[in-house]
Amino acid sequence: MPQPPAPSAQVTAAEISRIAGVTRATVSNWRRRHDDFPAPSGGTDSSPLYDLESVRAWLASRGHVSAANPSEELRTTLRLRAQSGGGTSDLLLLVLAAAGRSPEELTAAAQLPDPDLVTRAQRDVSTAADAVPSADAVRFKADDAAVLRALYACVRDEGGQAALGVLAERELEDSAASGAYLTPAPLADLLARLIPGSPSRVLDPACGGGTLLAAAARRGARELYGQDNLPVQALRSAVSLMLTAPEAEVTVRAADSLRADAFPDLLADAVLCNPPYGVRDWGHDELAYDPRWAYGVPARAESELAWVQHALAHLTPGGHAALLLPPATAGRASGRRVRAELVRSGALRAVIALPVGASVPLHVGLQVWVLQRPEPGGPERKSVLFVDTAADAATGTATAAGRGGTAVTARTRGGSRSASLDWEGITAHALGAWRAFTKNPDTFEGEPGVAHAVGVVDLLDDVVDLTPARLVRASRAEVDPAELSAGVEAARRGLVGAAKSLARTAGREGWSAAGASAREWRTATASDLARGGALTLLRTLPEGARGRADGGGSDGSGKRPDGAAVLTGSDIAGGSGPTGNPAELRGDSAPVIAVGDVLVRAVASGDGPMSRVAGEEDAGALLGPHVHLFRPDPKRLDAWFLAGFLGAEENIAGASTGSTILTVSPGRLRVPLLPLEEQRRYGEAFRHVHELRAEARRATLLAEDTARLLAGGLTGGQLLPSRGPAPDVPGDSGGRPRARRP
């Protein structure tokens, strides 16, 4: 008896816009203006679903070919597969197998007829299963052909890591329910760099997607051990590590590390971990007599202290661990006895407070605990280092007086996303203080308001509160009053100058009303302009694609400047020069930035501009992995005109994909088709907007830094309020109290 035809998949309006390479507003216009546009076949009035084949037929009848890039095509096929109950974990091994094939082999596989494609994928995944012994058997079906074809194409064009990222979006979409999330790469690198020396054997007992172990591999680790409670996370971590660190020995297991330790006899050189927080059902009752609790049995509410002791138990004597923990761990009453023993024994070496937004949960300022397993007969540890990096909350470029009165780079306080944080400043303060402390703890002087070493005896009170902000701020009295006063005066003068410059910039007028209605114009996608030779689109190849490129950088130079910095998305958002570390770029695939290049952030999240034109300060820098570079032909495109329209809010929204992380598809960004002379007029206006934003940022940074220095000086006793009224400020009806030197 013949089987009834399978129902066609359904897509949302957002997916239609991505398939067609247009904005969602355009899809809404099609629905209103064209009677033959397919009617909804499901969903609700507010979120209708459309028959995919009907939509494709309608688009084809009007000459709209698919504009979706390989990642987006994979996302669409995965969602369609999910409608019939299919997951993504069975595809992880195929990514590993496909990443080992040449582009020609992947192209041939993607072009196979459906039955042959399924057979080929089944054969490929069986070879990869040998590399991951704990993986379950995989069986693909005939209706998997579409997603298999999309996966091969994605790995071929964008690399294995890009394909893994798309699979993770689907599998871990509800991160709040699963408790699974990625540790931001800059934070992972910081934790790895806090481990002294070059550890070879590294363990992460809550490895998630493998970010921390990948950071350890970048620093030379060659034996990587991971464990995660979610099987899909363990498998994804194993595949990701095998792609990024093929020379390392990777062992990942799926089980609860506290209840079912997969490596009971392992002693590692280092442990890196970002464990789950606030878990009460972690095995308190059944593990009451566990030998790991050498520093005291953790209370039911102290699962984090269980993870701390689990890490110490897996270290060789003298080995170090770095754990990311919530701030409550440092002061909760139920953990006082364990904290006291960690301090008394010398196992706790440092506590580093991070700004709000460093990692999930984004509304909490997390802390890094650095631990060292005591060595029998080792040196006595008389103090613990405390560092507060909470002031390094966002990138900036203005210069003002620093915490101690000397000139430093001022940074905007606040901000809730990791991408907008000043990771360069955070890392510099944390590593600088930690390295100086480990070099000679007894003579460590610290930095007022930033880093302070507190004696063990002073910490062992009735509370044993290890909160860095409390202990570091207590050292502000060490600041010299005259030095702070000079710093405040320097900051004030800088603020006055910045305010005048902002007023001059804001006073320029370079626009007029368009008329009774907004202007309309024909547009072309960046992909169309690139095909026509008006611009060149460059990128830094994804990790999984490196090694298959045809030698050298993707700009065709084949050379990488010695000592060149890396321009990151955070640099564009914060208006700073290149601050990235070239050591984090593996291979020679990064293009070299030239004056006049247009730079666009690849992730549409966080505050700040999305684009800018490269100037002299950017020339010679390497392109970071999360930045798109558009190199216009100056005879056909004005650079500032291009930057202004590419970075427009609606343009970015229409070309972005993803749920929690919005990734910009550069080829789908649209640009008006205007004569060059008119482009230059728009370009001059966009340049003015850029200058206005930069001046406003500079004035804001200086104002905040001046206010912080004044408030700190008054509360710390270094400054005294004026006895008389301040001079009247223009437009102010009364005098204001002034601070004066003591």
Image: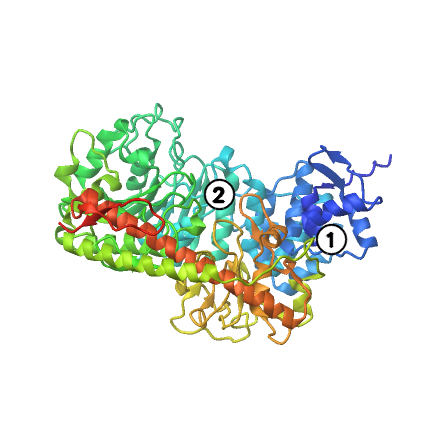
Q: In the image, what residue type sits under mark 1? A: Asp
Q: Position of residue 126 (x, y in %)?
A: 60, 49
User: Where 545 sits versus 120, above or below?
Assistant: below
List the residue tagged with mark 2.
234
Q: Position of residue 62 (x, y in %)?
A: 82, 55
Residue at coordinates 47% horizontally, 75% vertically from top-left?
559
487 horizontally vs 2: left or right: left
Q: Nearer the viewer, residue 89 or 467?
A: 467
Q: Position of residue 276 (x, y in %)?
A: 41, 36
List the residue tagged with mark 1.
116
Q: Nearer the viewer, residue 469 or 404?
A: 404
Residue at coordinates 75% horizontally, 34% vertically from top-left?
42
Of all residues, the one furthest to the right in this rendering is 1
User: Where 622 sits versus 415, above or below?
Assistant: below
Q: Nearer the viewer, residue 206 or 170?
A: 170
430 horizontally vs 6: left or right: left
- Other-residue count near label 1 (Cα within 10 Å), few / some / many at <14 / 14–19 / ≥20: some
Q: Secondary structure at mark 2?
A: helix
Q: Earlier in the sequence, mark 1 or mark 2?
A: 1
Rounded to the nearest angstrom, the CA distance separating label 1 from label 2 is 30 Å
Circles 1 and 2: CB distance less than 8 Å? no
Q: In the image, what residue type sits under mark 2? A: Ala
- Other-residue count near label 2 (Cα within 10 Å), few / some / many at <14 / 14–19 / ≥20: many
User: Where 162 sits versus 288, above or below?
Assistant: below
Q: How is the image coloured?
A: rainbow
User: Where 98 sits versus 684, above or below?
Assistant: above
